[in-house]
Amino acid sequence: MAKVFAIANQKGGVGKTTTCINLAASLVATKRRVLLIDLDPQGNATMGSGVDKHALEYSVYDLLIGECDLAQAMQFSEHGGYQLLPANRDLTAAEVVLLDMQLKESRLRNALAPIRENYDYILIDCPPSLSMLTLNALVAADGVIIPMQCEYFALEGLSDLVDNIKRIAELLNPQLKIEGLLRTMYDPRLSLINDVSDQLKEHFGEQLYDTVIPRNIRLAEAPSFGMPALTYDKTSRGALAYLALAGEMVRRQRRNSRTAQAN
Ligand SMILES: Nc1ncnc2c1ncn2[C@@H]1O[C@H](COP(=O)(O)OP(=O)(O)O)[C@@H](O)[C@H]1O
Ligand SMILES: [Mg+2]
């Protein structure tokens, strides 16, 4: 049964999409079966996976409103090696259209139910907002991965997100938890970074991933070729960091399931 992770942070430009694409490809490299869901109308994860968002017959929007089935919307990222439910601007209408639908916050969860056992990991790329789309992602997910830049203001928005996750866990999805906090675009030369890192460790303890993602130009270049960094330049620091993250995630999973068995 797949673990479903929403990659969320209501701030834009913190590395959500970059994390989705590169983590998906890295999990594939470790022989996991992966589905990436683009839930952002900007369609960046779709383009970065090498799928043209302008040429879609069906997208995740049609799936959410019941206009197509999973197989019709499903694409494959050739360079990434994972399956993709793509998105484009059509998805902006979802905010309004979903409001009138029954079980509006569970549409994604229900759509995924029949295929959860076909994958080891399902990653959901969230839009930069706490909207109906993000709500659908958080209701469908087992855990939230929060990418963040280590800057002073990063901590400010974090408490809103954490409060939201708690509220959704209480009301709609009791198994939802914070899977991990990921430091992205990490530049150890910035003096502030150690302070912020220390604060994060204090607040989030083991939830903070040991792996940090460095600022790396290859990670920024790769999406314009529709590739993960692992295909574009597999020796780049960015590609290696995401491989390390996949390893840490898988080890964490194994440890958690051992603890669960022991209890
Ligand atoms: N580790 C990194 N090093 C260099 N550039 C990065 C890194 N992570 C993301 N970027 C670039 O920063 C911008 C924002 O990243 P993105 O993943 O799109 O953020 P989000 O999805 O949270 O809006 C993009 O142009 C992306 O290529
Ligand atoms: Mg994005």
Image (cartoon, rainbow, N blue to C red):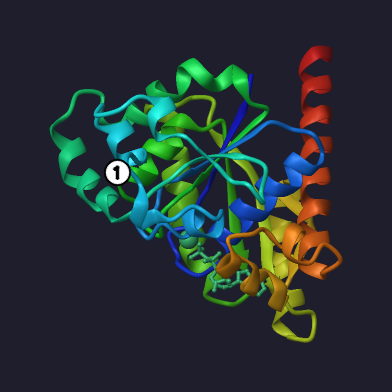
Quadrant of the image containing the N terminus: top right
Nearest to the observer: residue 93 or residue 129:
93
Label 1 Cα neighbours within 10 Å, binned few <14 / some 14-19 / many ≥20: some
Residue 252: horizontal and vertical position, in percent?
A: 80, 36
Relative to 75, does residue 205 appear above or below in the rendering?
A: below
Indicate whether 165 appears above or below 257: below
Residue where numbered disc 1 is placed:
132
Q: Is residue 164 above or below residue 170?
A: below
Quarter where residue 12 is shown:
bottom left
| Residue drawn at x 75%, y 48% as measured from the top left | 26
Q: Is residue 111 left or right of residue 204?
A: left
Q: Secondary structure at mark 1?
A: helix
Q: Residue at x 46, y 34 (%)?
A: 74
- Amino acid on which disc 1 is placed: Met
Residue 81's image quarter? Answer: top right
In the image, what residue occupies the spot 47% across and 15% down?
114
Q: Report whether 247 appears left or right of 172.
A: right
Position of 164 relative to 17 (above/below) = above
| Percent x, y of residue 112 | 46, 24
